Amino acid sequence: QVQAVESGGGLVQAGGSLRLTCRTSGRTFSSYDMGWFRQAPGKEREFVAAIRWSGAVTYYRDSVKGRFAISRDNAKNTVYLQMNSLKPEDTAVYSCAARTRGLTGSSRPGDYDYWGQGTQVTVSS
C-alpha cells in the first residue's frame, strides 16, 4: 500500500508560480514511477507530467512543456511539480499518483495504482 499526500496548492495570479509537493509512504518509493494529473470542474482528469523511478526520464503534456518541471527526491520519498508562468487554464485540482508496475512511462490514469487526495490550484487572470 502507498499513501500519497499533496501540498502546495493555492491561489496565484496569472504569470505566477507554485511548487506542488507529494509525499509518499508505504512501499519503496524509488522503485516506482510517479505522475501528476489534474482535473478541472466539468472536465475529465488529464495527464500533466510523469517521472520514471530513477528520475532520469520525464514526460509532459504539450501545454505545460517549458513551464512545468517534475522532479523527485528518492531519499525523501517525495515528488515535486514546479509550475511557472501559470495561466488561468491551469486551474484544477492536482493529484499525484504512483505507478508500481510497467516497464515504460505512462500518461494514462488507469496505469497508476495509488492516488493522493489532490490539492487545488487556482490561477486568476
Image: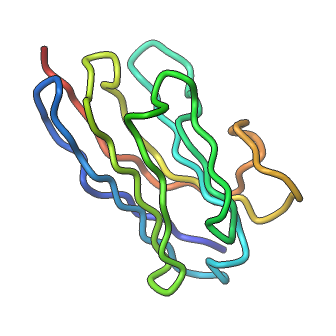
Residue at coordinates 40% horizontally, 22% vertically from top-left? 40
Task: Compare residues 36 and 93 and report the one nearer the observer.
Answer: 36
In the image as oriented, which residue stretches furthest toward the front? 66
Q: Is residue 55 left or right of residue 119?
A: right
* Image location of residue 2, percent across then percent down: 61, 71
69 versus 92 height, above or below: below
Marker count (numbered): 0
Q: In this view, does 20 lie to the left or right of 29?
A: left
21 versus 24 height, above or below: above
* Image location of residue 113, percent across then percent down: 71, 56
* Image location of residue 66, percent across then percent down: 43, 34
Task: Compare residues 36 and 110 and report the one nearer the observer.
Answer: 36
Quarter in which the N terminus is drawn = bottom right
In the image as oriented, which residue stretches furthest toward the bottom? 75
Residue at coordinates 37% horizontally, 58% vertically from top-left? 6
* Image location of residue 57, percent across then percent down: 67, 56
Instruction: Give the image's coloring scheme.
Output: rainbow
Splitting the image into 4 quarters, where does residue 23 fall?
A: bottom left
Quarter in which the C terminus is drawn = top left
In the image as oriented, which residue stretches furthest toward the right? 103
Splitting the image into 4 quarters, where does residue 94 fall?
A: top left
Residue at coordinates 40% horizontally, 47% vertically from top-left? 118
